[in-house]
Image (cartoon, grey):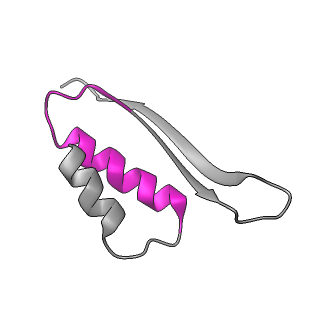
Amino acid sequence: VLESVHEIAGGAHVNLVETLAEKILSACFDDTRVSRVKVRVEKLDIYKDADSVGVEIDRVRESD
C-alpha cells in the first residue's frame, strides 16, 4: 500500500486534491486486507489567509 501511495504522489501532476485522494483510496482498497480507508490531502500555502486547503475521505469496503 505504501509503495502505491508513493507512486501516485510522485507521479504525474494532479490538479485536484480530490482526484489525488480518490486515487490513493482506490490503491488502498486494491489490498483485500484493507477494510477501511481514511485519506487526507492538503495543499499548503495556496491562499494568504489560509494555512492549507484540502479534502478528507473516509470509506468502508462494501461487503459482498
* Outermost left residue: 32
24 horizontally vs 48: left or right: left
- Provide the residue span drawn in magenta: 16-37
Q: Where is residue 13 in the image (x, y as percent from the top left)?
A: 42, 75
50 horizontally vs 55: left or right: right
What residue is at 29 percent from the left and 48 percent from the top?
26
Q: Where is residue 50 in the image (x, y as percent from the top left)?
A: 79, 54
Assess whether residue 34 is covered by the magenta stretch.
yes
> Above or below — where is 64 with respect to 47?
above
Q: Where is residue 18 in the image (x, y as percent from the top left)?
A: 51, 56
* Outermost bottom residue: 12
In front of the other: 3 or 19:
3
In front of the other: 43 or 62:
43
1 horizontally vs 17: left or right: left
In front of the other: 10 or 56:
10
> Above or below — where is 39 with respect to 19?
above
What residue is at 30 percent from the left and 71 percent from the top?
11
- Quadrant of the drawing holding the C terminus: top left
Assess whether residue 28 is covered by the magenta stretch.
yes
